[in-house]
Image (cartoon, helix red, strand yellow):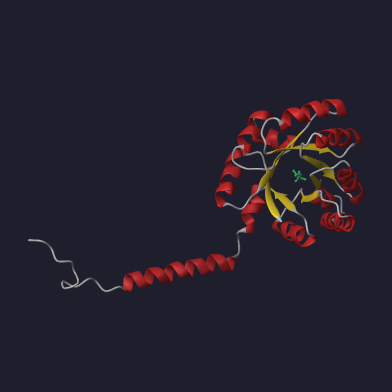
């Protein structure tokens, strides 16, 4: 399972890229607004340091979405165009996918919706696990069911577990067979954490320092001869 960051904050993305653990970024209009930058400018900037950058259309009608999707796709080769799982969004996605543009169908909440996304040739479908949990449904169950249905039907569309809220969601997404999980920077940082890693590393460094302190001071004979 590939790990993506769900943010439009450049500094967070640059740090995670430096760690070498992420393969992409997902953005949406809310995240772009939070980052406080111009949409185009920010997506272009992010696309220069990482592949697979999802950027969402905000038009509401099919024809407008198609025009907007083409424009977004032209920003950078790393851009994947996000369309909503609505009749207009899917109709636009089909046209764009037919032109070879990679499409991420967003706001997916059921297996049937995921089948619709696959039907238009989407590259990615994004089930929102956390938002299903919010309404007392089992979000990761839906992710697992989509993965199972796609496998059964030999569908190639990638399943991207989105709306991830905690590290347990990441583990569950991996066990469910998701191709990708996208998460906020705070959740990504938590994936590194384990008290035994921290304690183990502390002890290794302490023991190393002790061996350095215990080293005998060089004697006169061991000192390199100085030229007179
Ligand atoms: O990738 C989709 C994600 O941004 C939605 O997350 O936490 O707003 O439900 P959330």
| Vertical side of 113 occupied by 172: above or below | below
**One can see residue 42 in this view:** yes
Dividing the image into four quarters, tell me where ligand 1 lies.
top right
Quarter of the image where the N terminus is located:
bottom right
| Vertical side of 1 occupied by 26: above or below | above
How many labels, in total?
A: 0
Rendered residue at 91%/35% (across/down):
87
Quarter of the image where the C terminus is located:
bottom left
Rendered residue at 86%/26% (across/down):
63
Residue furthest toward the front?
A: 99
**One can see residue 38 in this view:** no
| Vertical side of 44 occupied by 224: above or below | below
In the image, 193 versus 110, the foreground residue is 110
Residue furthest toward the left?
A: 228
Residue 17 % position (x, y): 58, 47
In the image, 91 versus 30, the foreground residue is 91
Residue 31 % position (x, y): 70, 38
Residue 116 % position (x, y): 90, 44
Rendered residue at 75%/57% (across/down):
169
Residue 147 % position (x, y): 83, 56
Answer with the quarter of the image where residue 10 lies: top right
| Vertical side of 143 occupied by 218: above or below | below
In the image, 176 versus 204, the foreground residue is 176
């Amino acid at each position: 399972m590939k790990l993506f960051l769900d943010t439009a904050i450049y500094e967070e993305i640059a740090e995670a890229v430096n760690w070498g653990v992420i393969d992409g970024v997902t953005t949406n209009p809310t995240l772009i607004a939070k980052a406080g930058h111009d949409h185009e400018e920010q997506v272009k900037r992010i696309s220069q340091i990482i592949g697979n950058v999802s950027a969402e259309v905000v038009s509401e009608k099919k024809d407008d979405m198609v025009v907007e999707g083409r424009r977004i796709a032209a920003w950078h080769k790393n851009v994947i165009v996000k369309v909503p799982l609505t009749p207009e969004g899917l109709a636009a996605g089909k046209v764009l996918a037919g032109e070879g543009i990679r499409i991420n169908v967003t706001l997916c909440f059921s297996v049937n919706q995921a089948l619709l996304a696959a039907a238009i040739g989407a590259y990615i479908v994004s089930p929102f696990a956390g938002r299903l949990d919010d309404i007392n449904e089992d979000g990761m169950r839906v992710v697992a069911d989509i993965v199972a249905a796609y496998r059964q039907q030999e569908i190639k569309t990638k399943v991207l577990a989105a709306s991830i809220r905690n590290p347990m969601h990441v583990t569950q997404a991996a066990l469910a067979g998701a191709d990708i999980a996208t998460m906020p920077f705070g959740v990504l940082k938590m994936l590194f954490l384990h008290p035994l890693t921290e304690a183990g590393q502390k002890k290794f460094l302490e023991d190393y320092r002790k061996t350095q302190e215990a080293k005998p001071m060089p004697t006169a004979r061991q000192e390199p001869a100085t030229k007179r």
